Amino acid sequence: MIRRQFNAYIQSYHGLSREIWLLALITLINRAGTMVVPFLSLYLTASLGYSLSQVGWVMTAFGVGSILGAWLGGKLTDLFGYYKVMLASLIGAGVVFIIVQYLNDFWFLVGGVFVLMLVADMFRPAMYVSIRAYSKPENNTRSVTLIRLAINFGFSFGPAMGGLIIATLTYGSLFWIDGITCLVASILLYMLLNEKDGMPITDEKANGQKSQSAYADLPYLVFLAIVFLTAIVFLQMFATVPVYYKTVHLLTEGQIGLLLGMNGMLIFLFEMPLINWLENSRVSKATVLLVGTLILGLGFLVFNLSGWVGILVISMFFITLGEMLIFPFANSFAMERSQKGKAGEYMALFPIAFSAAHIIGPNIGMQLIENYGYGFTWNMTFVATAVGLGLCLYLKYRLNAESYGNSNKKISSAVT
């Protein structure tokens, strides 16, 4: 029984290209050093002494830089190619990470965080386009999942180590580690991956018709709205939840790091088999998004059910399961939809939707907590997911109508 399950687990990785594995390795090394982000709100409050309202504005700068970086990365990817953009982003982020730790004045820090995310998030649309280039179309979802596994395995290691480093050294040490790992990842990208090994990415559809603008693709825009709402909820795990752990449940930084690390470890162990099973069962991506959105919302709502510390583990399980259902299929949906137009434009809008949530998500979470308390805030996260559920149902309707229309066109063409 155990051997059969282990073989099924290994089989779920079969068929992925060498380049995807190398990209996953580079991503793993880069993300293993990403220790600042989950502790950023604690760094700003505990180390620098900023208020929750000030933290909210720093996190908003984080989001604005992220959204502009993703937009710029998409534009540059269409102009210069994904490889050059990924390399430049990793080098630039490594340098800026090291600089930001020395910015203690509030407005200089706001500007530094903005520039950091502007440079760092140019990487994301370029990376998504590179997955299209290095992966077979039928392996897109599993390729995305492998990259996510690398991200989350690194993230499970990062917060746990970050908590220990804070306890033994300083918060500033995290910025050095983040910067160095970005630079190491850039060296590995240059040494191990060759742009020529990827398939060419064109901005014209196979039948020679003019490319569709992503801004005119209504189902894609509805999908982006779902990503935006679910990201607002999910990002509370990095912004308000660590503060909740520390102030309400009195956890130490080390305990918080281990609890956040549980998220990455669960994803590493179970996401790929889950994705493989869902793909084989041929459940639609819109259905998976709907179920994942519901479970994600429940992950925050359970905070209000009990003051028992064990509820934190139950919450993390629900949040992680929702994440596993939403984001791999969301990535895959965006990649498939990008075949309708310019890949950079489509794949820039996807991280932009996530980055837009950074602009208001952490900030509004902090403001709600400061003015209305944690219980009200967790209720509002569930309301946001309820709106997302409605949009998921509408997306299913639009996609079914689109599929029906395409089938009729094929039948009509065959008859004539």
Image (tube, helix red, strand yellow):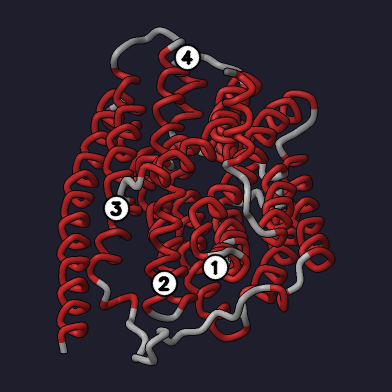
Mark closer to the chain start, 2 or 4: 4
- Quadrant of residue 80 within the rendered picture: bottom right
Front-most of residues 335 and 189: 335
The kind of residue on which mark 3 rests is Ile
Tag in front: 2 or 4: 2
Q: Can you tell which of label 4 and label 3 is closer to the viewer? A: 3
Vertically, is 374 above or below 153? above
Q: Could you tell me which secondary element the residue under label 2 belongs to?
A: helix
Residue denoted by label 2 = 338
Within 10 Å of disc 3 (Cα), the crowding (few <14, some 14-19, many 20+) is many
**Amino acid type, label 2:** Ser
Question: Residue 226's x, y, as percent?
Answer: 29, 52
Could you say which is closer to the camera, residue 361 or residue 297? 297
> Which label's residue is closer to the chain start, 2 or 3?
3
The percent position of residue 160, horizontal first and vertical second, equals 67, 28
Mark 1 lies on residue: 132
Check the image and name the residue furthest to the top: 308
Q: Is residue 316 left or right of residue 360?
A: right
User: Which mark, by number, is residue 249?
Assistant: 4
Q: Where 288 sits versus 112, above or below?
A: above
* Left or right: where 106 falls relative to 28: left
- Structural distance between the alpha carbons of marks 2 and 3: 17 Å
Task: Find out whether the residues at labels 4 and 3 contact each other: C-beta distance under 8 Å.
Answer: no
Who comes first in sequence, dot 3 or dot 1? Answer: 1
- The amino acid type of the residue labelled 4 equals His
Q: CA distance from mark 2 to mark 4?
A: 44 Å
Say what secondary structure mark 4 lies in.
loop
401 above or below 285? below
Q: Earlier in the sequence, mark 1 or mark 2?
A: 1
